[in-house]
Amino acid sequence: MTATAGGKSDAQFSPDGKEVFYLEQGRIQTVSVEARQPKPLAVTAEMDVDFAQEKREVFRQAWDIQNEGFFDPGFNGVDWPAVRATYAPLVAGARTPDELRRLLNLMVGELNASHSGVSGPGGAAQFTTGRIGLRFDPDEYESTGKLRVTEVLPLSPAALAGNIQPGDYLLAVDDTLLDAWTNLDQCLENKVNRRVSLAVSASAGGANRREVVVRPVNQATEKGLLYKEWVRQQRAYVAKASGGRLGYVHMFDMSGESLSAFYLDLDAENHAREGVVVDVRNNNGGFVNVYAIDVLARRGYLTMTPRGLPAAPARTQLGQRALEAPTILVTNQHSLSDAEDFAEGYRTLKLGKVVGEPTAGWIIYTSGTQLIDGSTIRVPFIKITDNAGKSMEMAPRPVDVAVSRPIGESYTDRNRQLEVAVKELLQQLDAKGSKSSVSGGK
């Protein structure tokens, strides 16, 4: 009934059934069943909260929720009642909600379990600063206070507007001249999706100054564009290092959206490659690892050849996704949670080698429960073990070939983890080809 971006909850019909009332980012909204035009409901209310009473109840709730729901009845070896006795007087002395939550986080931290913590109430922060998709030379700014463009992010407002190139100088935003004492973000505050005029020149002195009109996007949109460009660079790196033989795919996280992108990337970029580098570095988890593993684990057993058309594996011909090509996996210490489950499945099923750094060891299932003050506490409630019965929590998934990226390498044109992954997979492909030739010769 609505298509607005905010999360919605607590929907209920009006008595006559013609309207729906709901909460969106803490505000009461109403939408007509027929017209389907959402609008805010003007409500004025006051609420007195006795913080001295509330903090004691919040503390009781937080302790009880962990006491009843924590995955380990032994509480990871911690005397949980003793923890309550320790923190109760500290909570009694808390003077603000933030101070209370800090104490609750310290209390939960005694359990030494990943994914845990207490966060404050409220929806996602709203970012109002416009982003135009330009990157600037930090050395130039430090020495002269000038903003010299080093990169125009593809598909960003600056790229779509055209007429801005690396090497140009950004001189002004609307009527505000830029210098070492000007905050560019402040100039773009509340400018998301609004007309903004940029003054640009090929020289720092402003000769042949020209106007470029852009419509800034928000931070989330620019972050997505940055990620797409990063993936493009990694794919190009693998293609160049392998002489075009290998493909590349990265999973941003383990969400349904990333799984769909994973499918799309495999279909569009990688079925024609001899092998594929699968990258889950900096993937912070989710819940879809088994579906992604399935695509890599499925093996062909039939080939279908329609008359006049090339032969193709039966699985893909019949609509089932299957890569059916050798792969290699790249992980790092920022591969967390479900990305680690993915790495475990990859190793256990012997799909290929794992290159890079061991994962973080954050391998446990959690859920969030709301406390009376609107805070949310996360509770680890499902233990994960490998096929040998060993707990995977606090046990990073190992790698077959250890490669760490030195500090500062990301500022260069080199990526050692991808280099090694490409080398290892090519060696595997070449060895397989040699064995096939020998076998054929026999």
Image (cartoon, helix red, strand yellow):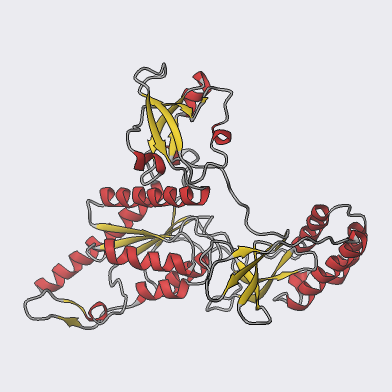
Q: How many marks?
A: 0
The residue shown at (19%, 65%) is 433
Q: Indicate left or right for 199 with 238 as reference.
A: right
For the question of whether residue 184 can be seen, the reply is: yes
**Image location (x, y in percent) of residue 267:** 29, 67
For the question of whether residue 404 can be seen, the reply is: no
**Image location (x, y in percent) of residue 6:** 58, 62
**Image location (x, y in percent) of residue 259:** 42, 68
The residue shown at (36%, 44%) is 154
Q: Indicate left or right for 189 with 372 as reference.
A: left
Quarter of the rendering occupied by the C terminus = bottom left
**Image location (x, y in percent) of residue 430:** 22, 61
Hey, which residue is sitting farthest left in the picture? 308
Q: Is residue 209 above or below residue 72?
A: above
Given residues 416 and 83, the one toward you in this image is 83
Q: Indicate left or right for 50 with 156 as reference.
A: right
Q: Is residue 66 above or below residue 280?
A: below
Given residues 80 and 143, the one toward you in this image is 143
Given residues 295 and 232, the one toward you in this image is 232
Residue 54, quarter of the rendered image: bottom right
Q: Indicate left or right for 46 with 217 as reference.
A: right
Given residues 119 and 189, the one toward you in this image is 189
